[in-house]
Amino acid sequence: MGTSVAQWLDERTGAGTVWQALFKRKIPRGVNFLYTFGAATMFIFMLQAVTGIILAMYYSATPETAYDSIMFFTTQVGYGSIVRGLHHWGASSMVVLVALHALVVFALGAYKYPRELTWVVGILLLGIVVGFSFTGYLLPWDEKAYWATTVGTNMAGTVPFAGNFLLLVLRGGSELGAVSLTRFYAYHTVLLPSLALMLIVVHLYLVVKHGVSVPPWLWERKPKLEAKRVEA
């Protein structure tokens, strides 16, 4: 029964082809744990999405109720402290994993032809992950979040020519207030997730299209083997 349903869905959606392209593609020799940071980041992103949706069901984005709604979720809702802890620490680990992934790609030369666009999309995703952390920090609306975000937005306001515009876009006014909290909540739950999903799809497509880059210590091995065969 399960096989029939899977075949029926595959014929109409092509899901089997997508599954094979993502999980049954050929991987070059020499790949090691350094190549796992991208998959680990993807797992944390999915965890953040699930825990974020649960948190959003209880969160109230107003200065009067934001902190209380989070405290209620943490202390009164079953497993609320675990869900919030996963979301909180998942945000930090996601920044670390994305940064490590970018460093490994750069160190192994995996950004070179024909993967330049894959690298550019990855850097954009790194910026979005940082944006997730920045916009989510204000949402508890406690004193620490308020003043940290004040400092962060002040830094954005020092950008030459566009500083005042960026400050207005982020805060919605001259000071942090109700509009600022609403905007940060919208950025965190609507704008950034939408951009992230689009870029992740593009990133995965490019990774599948061009394949996994061979480690540098294997770059010269194949030409040497071919030369020996010619001489023989």
Image (tube, grey):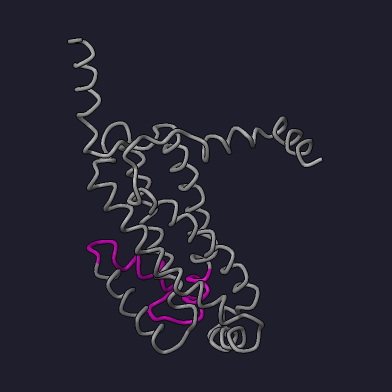
Please report the residue visible at 56 percent of the width from the left and 82 percent of the height from the top: 81
User: Between residues 20 and 189, which one lies in front from this camera angle?
Assistant: 20
Is residue 170 covered in magenta? yes
In the rendered view, tell whether residue 127 sits above or below residue 3.
Answer: below
Q: Looking at the magenta stretch, what is its main secondary structure?
A: helix
Q: Position of residue 127 (x, y in %)?
A: 36, 58
101 or 232, nearer to the observer: 232
Q: Quadrant of the C terminus?
A: top left
The image quadrant that residue 82 belongs to is: bottom right
Instruction: Answer with left or right where residue 182 lies relative to residue 145.
Output: right
Which quadrant holds the N terminus?
top right
Task: Reply above or below: 56 against 114.
Answer: below
What residue is rendered at 60% in x and 85% in y?
Answer: 69
Question: x and y percent of residue 7 in the render?
Answer: 74, 33
Q: Position of residue 133 (x, y in %)?
A: 41, 69
Classify residue 180 as left or right of residue 166.
right
In magenta segment, residue 139 = no
Magenta span: 159-185
Residue lying furthest right: 1
Compared to residue 10, the image places residue 184 above or below, namely below
Please give left or right for residue 63 compared with residue 158 in the image: right
Which residue appears at 34% of the width and 42% of the height?
31
Report which quarter residue 76 is drawn in.
bottom right
Which residue in the rendered view is the most extreme toward the front? 232
Residue 25 lies, in percent from the top left, at 48, 34
Report how many numbered discs are placed on residues in the image. Answer: 0
